[in-house]
Image: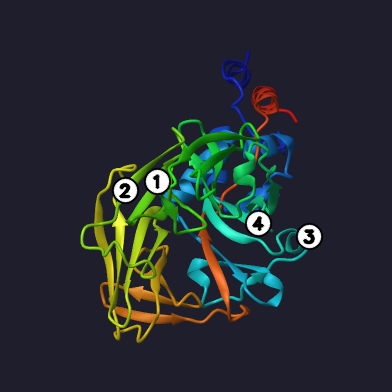
């Protein structure tokens, strides 16, 4: 036996993922392909699904989707921004946060344009945007993959609550059950607030709890952070109502110390940098942004930002932070809801953002680009992964 034959017999073929052999050579090992694909944005990955069935199965697998999402959250969160025009047909426009000054926004075309017509933002989580349409329909939309899912309408609402039109909706992710959930509050005034929870995993609505009628919500749409949804509410004085998606129960939280708890029109809740923030606005004076520390529903706050007026922003009605730049040196600020400014906190300088191709009046929402699906068939996914593993070992399509 010559040396070349001996080496060929002793070594086993490397696991590969690709079209197999080309000119007598093997393609990259699966581990290398996995790591290379993880570094690609969603759009190129969608094209890579067409290379071969093993690549498609790999990119669609829950393991790859989760790893890709985690990498994006760590390296470039809140990289995308969506605008919903109040005029011009209520259409949606998309752009990258870091290139707002350098490119024209992309307007959605049909069939998405028609499907999303009239919908308003509820919130976003892991690259999935939740929308509320016609005061009854809840839609889930992944802007990166262009997939939309319309959720079933709850059928477990008692008659006293069915007669009420006071709805509040929130959307987030339950890390305990690895499930996306939509929470809907229906306020009957006399009998309290009925809470229903939709599970994407089971595709069903369930009744969670009824909250006392001494609480009144001050927001239509809850904000999501750290496993819970948050609403500004009133119980005599103002409070924050937190709904834990894991245990599906609410908790009442006081406002940060030093915030006036009786002035309704000066406050609001937002999500910034994946944290809950309270906007505390003093007209013609200043705006304070309080950030809740990342410790579940425990109540610990710190003042993140204070903007004086008149100051570097001039006169404004309201201001709030939207996203960090990718370098995290600048903060994108929304001013009066229809203008954006980059703020350099170290130099205390601002740079006005001019967005090309956008109507004058709009709402905006940031999101993290992802491959997240709206459902997983774990049986089919297991079968696909077995096929991929067979391909690794057999080195064939």
Which of the 4 quarters of the picture holds residue 321? bottom left
Contact (CB < 8 A) between labels 4 and 3? Answer: no
Mark carried by residue 207: none
Q: Secondary structure at mark 2?
A: strand
Disc nearer the start of the sequence (3/2): 3
Image-based side of 365 in relation to 357, left or right: left
- Residue nearest the viewer, comparing 317 with 179: 317
Image-based side of 182 in relation to 314, left or right: right
Mark carried by residue 135: 4
Mark carried by residue 111: 3
Give the percent coordinates (x, y) of residue 26.
65, 34
Q: Secondary structure at mark 4?
A: loop
- Residue nearest the viewer, comparing 34 with 157: 157
**Is the C terminus in the top left, top right, bottom left or bottom right quadrant?**
top right
Asked whether residue 226 appears in the rendered view, the answer is yes
C-alpha gap between disc 1 and disc 4: 23 Å
**Is the N terminus in the top left, top right, bottom left or bottom right quadrant?**
top right
What residue is pinned by disc 1? 242
Give the mark toward the camera: 4 or 3.
4
C-alpha gap between disc 4 and disc 2: 28 Å
User: Are there few (<14), some (14-19), or many (20+) residues within 10 Å of tag 1?
Assistant: many
């Amino acid at each position: 036996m010559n040396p070349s034959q001996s080496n060929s017999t002793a070594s086993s073929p490397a696991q590969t993922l690709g079209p197999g052999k080309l000119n007598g050579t093997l393609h990259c090992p699966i581990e290398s392909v996995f790591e290379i694909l993880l570094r690609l944005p969603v759009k190129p990955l969608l094209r890579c699904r067409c290379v071969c069935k093993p690549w498609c199965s790999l990119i669609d697998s829950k393991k790859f989707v989760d790893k890709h999402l985690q990498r994006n959250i760590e390296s470039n969160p809140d990289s995308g921004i969506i605008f919903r025009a109040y005029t011009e047909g209520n259409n949606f426009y998309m752009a990258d946060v870091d290139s707002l000054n350098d490119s024209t926004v992309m307007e959605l075309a049909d069939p998405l344009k028609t499907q999303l017509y009239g919908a308003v933002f509820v919130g976003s989580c892991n690259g999935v945007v939740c929308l509320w349409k016609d005061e009854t329909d809840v839609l889930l939309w992944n802007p990166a993959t262009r997939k939309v899912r319309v959720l079933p309408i709850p059928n477990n609402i008692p008659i006293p609550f069915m007669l009420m039109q006071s709805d509040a909706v929130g959307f987030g992710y339950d890390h305990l059950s690895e499930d996306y959930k939509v929470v809907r509050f229906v306020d009957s005034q006399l009998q309290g607030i009925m809470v229903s929870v939709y599970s994407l995993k089971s595709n069903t609505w369930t009744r969670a709890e009824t909250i006392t009628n001494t609480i009144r919500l001050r927001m239509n749409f809850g904000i999501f952070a750290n496993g819970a949804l948050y609403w500004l509410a009133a119980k005599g004085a103002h409070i924050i109502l937190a709904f834990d998606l894991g245990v599906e129960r609410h908790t009442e939280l006081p406002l940060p110390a030093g915030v006036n708890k009786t002035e309704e029109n000066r406050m609001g809740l937002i999500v910034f940098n994946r944290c809950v923030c309270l906007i505390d606005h003093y007209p013609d004076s200043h705006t304070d942004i309080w950030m809740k520390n990342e410790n579940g529903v425990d109540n610990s706050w710190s003042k993140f930002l204070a903007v004086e007026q008149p100051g570097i922003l001039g006169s404004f009605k309201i201001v709030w932070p939207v996203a960090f730049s990718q370098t995290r040196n600048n903060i994108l600020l929304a001013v009066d809801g229809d203008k954006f400014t980059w703020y350099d906190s170290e130099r205390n300088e601002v740079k006005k953002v001019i967005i090309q191709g956008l109507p004058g009046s709009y709402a905006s929402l940031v999101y993290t680009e992802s491959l997240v699906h709206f459902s997983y068939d774990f049986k089919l996914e297991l079968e696909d992964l077995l096929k991929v593993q067979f391909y690794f070992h057999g080195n064939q399509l």
